Amino acid sequence: MILIDTVISNSSEIAELKMLEVADLRGSQISSMGDLNMFPQLKTLIVRPDQLPQEEKNRLHPQVQIK
């Protein structure tokens, strides 16, 4: 999944994508990503270096690689 020019305030907006393994959110504004834990198969999250606060990164499953 690649989101461009998107504002994500609640990731439940993408919750119906049960097979999500890779999410490229570099083109989006993110305020909360805690709901990404609903995607147990998520392996890779692609974000800009300054895009996701450390506390949001810490809320993700340990198997998720942040690039």
Image: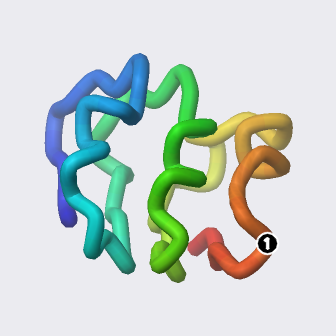
Q: Label 1 belongs to which residue?
A: 62
The answer to which quarter of the image holds residue 32 is: top right
Q: Is residue 23 left or right of residue 50?
A: left
Image quadrant where one finds the C terminus: bottom right
Vertical position of residue 37 compared to residue 30: above or below: below
At 28% from the left and 64% from the top, the residue drawn is: 18
At 46% from the left and 29% from the top, the residue drawn is: 30
Q: Is residue 62 left or right of residue 2?
A: right
Q: Position of residue 65 (x, y in %)?
A: 64, 78
Q: Is residue 54 left or right of residue 24?
A: right
Vertical position of residue 56 compared to residue 17: above or below: above
Q: Position of residue 28 (x, y in %)?
A: 31, 37
Label 1 neighbour load within 10 Å: few <14, some 14-19, many 20+: few
Image quadrant where one finds the N terminus: bottom left
Vertical position of residue 49 compared to residue 29: above or below: below
Three-letter amino acid code of the residue under disc 1: Pro
Vertical position of residue 63 compared to residue 8: above or below: below
